[in-house]
Amino acid sequence: MKILLVLLLAAGCSSRGISPSQTEGKTTYSYTDVAGTYRIAREFKMVKQRLVSRNVLLSSGSDNKTLEKSITVSKLGSIRSNKSRLITLRPEASEFSVWLEGKKYSSSMRINPKTKSMRVTLDSPESRWRGTQEIPFPKGKFFCFYNQIPECLYRNSLLQNAYDTKKKKLEFFVIWDNYPYLQDQLSHVGKNLFAPATLKFDGEIKNNFRYIVEVEGQIILYQFTKSLDLVKMAWIAQGITMAVPGDDTNSAEEM
């Protein structure tokens, strides 16, 4: 997609740490799943009222081999809420690629405002994962690409609202920008593009704020500094953890 390439080039490179409160950031995390330990480079930048994010999963060796890559773009907008307008971050487009057994599997998405749907185009070595389809958006106020969840929750004010309301669960939808390949690789994850989710503030741990995202009946924990910089993520049921290098709590159980 040309729009993703143009925005990504405009975003450029930054050496700052990931911080949703800033307009840009970049850092590399340690990433562990059931298959091994890797590195994941995450970066984002606000470009012309759009949040452009890129995640690249790299091999742990010196070759820096790319195993998975995603680019997501969401646009600042507003929705009607009671008698006022609510500022929101609205998903616009994404591109995702994963290399499985040396073969490339990819998907690209672009919102169709006229039909209120997401156009999904798949390309892979397997015939079942080729072609284009349009998937209608479910009714909801907030939508976040999976690989953009931390920044999306921040810019939709959901992190602050969850903190203010403490144990109350706030609703949103996850868009699996790695659809349908993630669902095929992970266990007990539904087959749909959109998944209803909730966010809840879960208190403080080691001077960080911890939040719980529940999606597909599974828990994903996110830790932020008190200035809402992302420091760690753990998807407990899948054995996935992502942490700033040098963090002394690297397992999901220690989250």
Image: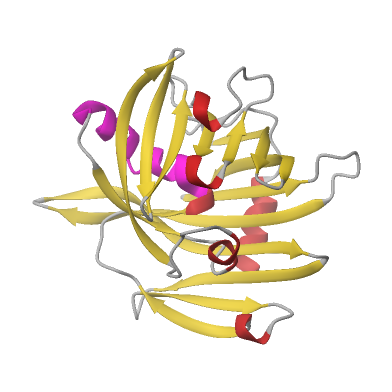
Name the residue nearer the viewer: 57 or 157.
57
Q: How is the image coloured?
A: secondary structure
The residue lying at 48 percent from left, 26 percent from top is 255
The number of numbered badges drawn on the structure is: 0
The residue lying at 70 percent from left, 62 percent from top is 98
Q: Is residue 154 left or right of residue 139?
A: right
Q: Is residue 148 left or right of residue 156?
A: right
**Prevailing secondary structure of the magenta residues:** helix
Residue 132 percent across, percent down from the top left: 55, 84
Q: Extreme top residue here? A: 207
Q: Is residue 154 found inside the magenta-colored segment of the image? A: yes
The residue lying at 69 percent from left, 24 percent from top is 245
Is residue 98 visible in this depiction of the protein? Answer: yes
Above or below for 188 versus 119: above
Name the quarter where the N terminus is drawn. Answer: bottom right
Q: Is residue 146 found inside the magenta-colored segment of the image? A: no
